[in-house]
Structure formats: structure tokens, C-alpha cells
Image (cartoon, grey):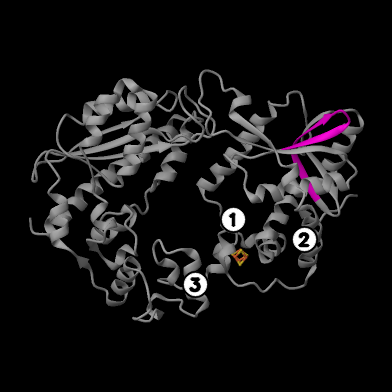
Amino acid sequence: MAFHQLSKSSFIKGLQCEKHLYLYKHHYELMDTLSEIQKAVFSRGTNIGILAQKLFPEGIDTSPRDVRQTSKAVEQTDQFIKNGASILYEAAFIYDEVMVYCDIISLHEGKWQIFEVKSSTGISETYLWDAAVQYYVLRGAGYEIEDISIVYINNEYVRQGEVNLDEFFTVESVLADIQSLLPVVQQNVRKFKGVLNRPEMPDIEIGEYCTNPYRCSFFNYCWKKIPENSVFDISNMHFKKKMELYRDGIIKLDDIPNDYPLSKNYKIQVDAFKSGESLINKEAIKEFLEDFEYPLYFMDFESFQPAIPLYDNSKPYQQIPFQYSVHILTEPDAELKHYEFLADPNEEPRKPFIEHLLHDLGDHGSIVVYNKSFEIGRLNEIVRDFPEHLEAIERIVERIVDLMVPFQKKYYYKPEMQGSYSIKYVLPALLPELSYENMEIGDGATASVSYELLREMDDMFEIEKIRNNLLEYSKLDTYAMVRIYQKLIQEIDL
Ligand code: SF4
């Protein structure tokens, strides 16, 4: 019976950190729980893999029903090849106690071509290692390899009609790129098997590799020793710099000496944390608010990014806006009005989205957003894809003001913001009674995934529940902006 100790993925884990490899093999139960977003990313990868099989039609799917039946998968692959199969999906091979599944292999004039499918839009170093391990195993197992390629998504592809797979995918040979890696694959295979057979876990400190090239799946386990309010909470500081502080024994924010050289923004965060005092530049806030003209339209968009373009005139991973919320304040003490839109998930959302939006935004007054690059980016994409709205959208963009500015520029800073100017930190710091906590949908990424899920659902109750959660979340976003604006007015005694 074929025996293996390593797989492609455990090999890649070993490259990142030997402790990661060891934990994965011997302490799987300590792995971080996958978030809904991570699960969605995995399922996206599977869908892209299945789609790429259509580039090589009529192949035989050799993937085992039970992923633990690796020996059977290898035997089956061997049998199919002996019986003359020339295209196989998920073919399994073992050599040197390393097991690999190849997404697609195809026989060409007596030699095999290997195709590794990725749902990304380019080739990373990790993918080259991935390809090198496959090449090492298949060649070691006695197969002649003509070529090995990465199949990835062409982010310049624009859908018109049915998805054109030859244009949607880019197939790029990496045979030449992996040659220098092959001797190292062999050395690492030996080394990693040694790691797995040690009685003790490798004694490895946390480091830059914990998040590079990926966030390690045992991150929470290794990082639980880091206390709250540590140097790792310094917002926007480069991870390498944080590690430098950590290695110097400076772990908590309180440990940072007062004369430690820090740039202005980091110093504001650290000093405010130590003193517990807020910072407020009333003059700068007043000047910023002078640009606001009533009626004020507090506006927020939600979007999702389908890997395979769903609509004509859209690209892979393009941000497709599907929802907005607008709160309107006609004058300082007026009653708030609220408008909202959530597209039918079974229809192209952009057209109804922009038509409703243009209607709801009136023709004058400031449009207040939080982080204007996002909303302006989506509006510009709509202009590109639906040029008939060019003039109306240009007028909208001219009216946009960004409520993030006073927090980004630290005109107003409270220690509770933890160095961040994201609304998710600013809101609870300024208005603790308002919070995204305990909401079923409490951030933009979950909103995207939820909307994408709606497209596949048929349970009416579940659909209604998710729709309501989406509406509630987006409404809170714009209501939060209204309250933050009012708080600024109040703070500067306008
Ligand atoms: S969290 Fe870091 S130290 Fe721990 S296993 Fe992962 S990469 Fe290694």
C-alpha cells in the first residue's frame, strides 16, 4: 500500500514554518476556526477548478469520494492511465512519500502536461513551489513530463454573452521557472519528514512568516501569549517594525519608552493610550465642516466581487454594487429620512442600483461618505460600463465629502480608536451605545458573501432573513455617519 507523509499543502506549510507543518500533522485540533469569508474563498477555488476542467473536456474525474482514501486514489489513477486515459482531473500520485493531486493532466504525444488551477489573477512564488512539488513527484513516479502550467484568471477579461473560457483563463508554462526549485524540493522533503518524525514540536518563535505568504492557520494558537494593547495593535505600522519592537522586548504599548523614535501618527496612538487622553483640533474640524451644505445625504454602498463575471460588461473580481443606504438630514434639527436599495440577487444589480440612487440623491446638497475612494471608485466603474449616466454621476461625485478626513488626519483622536480611523473603531469610540457587535452581518466582507449566497438559496425564510440583515447593516452604516457628524458639531460647539 502506498504510504505518504507529506502532501503539496503540507509541504507549502513547511516552507512557511516547520512548526506550522508539525501542528498541521499532529495537532489539527488546534487550528483556527475558518470564518465564513475564508470558507467562501475555498469554495470559490473549487468552483474555478471545476470551470477550468472545461478547457480540457471529456477528462476522467479521479477524485476519491473520501479524501482519506489516498491509496485508492493513487491506484485508481494508475489504472485509468494504464487503460489509456489521456485527460484526468484530480489525478493522484505518490513518490518519496509525498502525495499530490494534480488539478488536470493531459497526455500529448506520449508525454504528460500538468495544469494547476488557481483562482487568483497572477502567479505567486508559492504557486511555483506547488508546481515544483507536482513535477518532482510525477517525474519521480516515472512519468515523462512535457510541460507544467499554472491556469489563472485573466483580470482583463470583459464578459460579453457566455463566458469565453479561453479568454477568461490564462495558461502559463512555469517549467523553466521551477527548474531551480527542484533540487531544493528534494532537500526539503527530507527535512520536513524529519520534522514530522521528531517527538517534539519545533521550538519556533512567532515572526514575519506567521502572516507571509498567508496568515498561518495556527495563528491564534501561537499568538495567544501576546497581551491586549501590544505593539502589534499599532495601527498601520509595518509588521516588520512591530517584530523589531517585539524582539527588543517591547511588547505592550506601555513598554514603549517615551523617547522612543516613532512617527507622528504612531506617537499619537501610543501617547493617547498611555495618558488616556483624547486629542481634538477644533479649528481644523470647523474648517473641514465648512464644506458641508444642507441637505446632507449620508450614503454608503455595499458591493460583491464574483470571480467569474456574472454580467455583461464586467470583469473577474470587479466590485459590483448591489445595495445602498442613504440617510437625509435636510437641516440640523430636521427629522432624518431614510432611503435604501437592495438588488434582486437574480438580476443584474448595477442598472437598478444607479437609477434608484440618482433619484434618491436629489440635485443639491453634500453627499457624505466614509472613505470616498470606495464610493467614487464604484461610481466611476458604472460610468465606464454604462456611459449614459456620465453627466449625472459626475454631478454626484462633485458633491461628495469624506467624513473620514478628521479621523484620518487625527483632528480628532480617542484612545479607544486604537490607532484606526475605520468607522468600525471610530463609531464605538465616539458613540459606545451604537455598535456593530451582535449583528448577524457586521462588516462589508460578510455583507458581500451573504449577498453572493442569496443567489444560490431557495428557502424563502432564509432569503428574507439575510435580506433583512443586509438592510439593517447598511442602515446602521449611514446612521452611524449621521451621529458621528452630529458628534463633531457638538464637540466644536457649532
Ligand atoms: S503562527 Fe507562526 S510560529 Fe506559529 S506555526 Fe504559524 S507560522 Fe509558525
Rounded to the nearest whole Å, what is the CA distance between mark 3 and mark 1?
21 Å
* Residue in the foreground of this view, choosing between 410 and 435: 410
Could one spot residue 195 in this view of the protein? yes
Q: Quadrant of the C terminus?
A: bottom left
* The label number, if any, that marks residue 213 in the structure image: 1
Q: Position of residue 193 (x, y in %)?
A: 80, 63
Would you identify the image quadrant in which residue 424 lies? bottom left
Amino acid under disc 3: Ile
Numbered tag placed on residue 188 in the rendering:
2
Residue visible at 63% across and 38% down?
46
Q: Residues within 10 Å of mark 3 (few under 14, many from 20)?
A: some
- Given the image, on which type of amino acid does mark 1 rest? Pro
Q: Secondary structure at mark 2?
A: helix
Residue at the outermost top position? 161
Please check the rendered image and state whether residue 101 is part of the magenta-colored stretch, yes or no: yes
**Where does the magenta region start and end?**
99-115
Q: Are marks 2 and 3 in contact (CB under 8 Å)?
A: no
Asked if disc 2 and disc 1 are in contact, CB closer than 8 Å, the reply is no
Q: Residue at x 78, y 56 (%)?
A: 185
Instruction: Please give the residue where the numbered disc 3 appears in the rendered image.
Output: 226
* Residue at mark 2 to residue at mark 3: CA–CA distance: 31 Å
| Above or below, 355 relative to 258 | above
Q: For the residues marked 2 and 1, what is the alpha-carbon distance in whole angstroms?
A: 18 Å
Q: Nearer the viewer, mark 3 or mark 1?
A: 1
Mark before the other along the chain sequence, 2 or 3: 2
Assess whether residue 395 is covered by the magenta stretch.
no
Question: For ligand 1, which image quadrant applies?
Answer: bottom right
Among the 4 quarters of the image, the one containing residue 493:
bottom left
* Dominant SS in magenta: strand
Residue 212: percent from left, percent from top: 57, 58
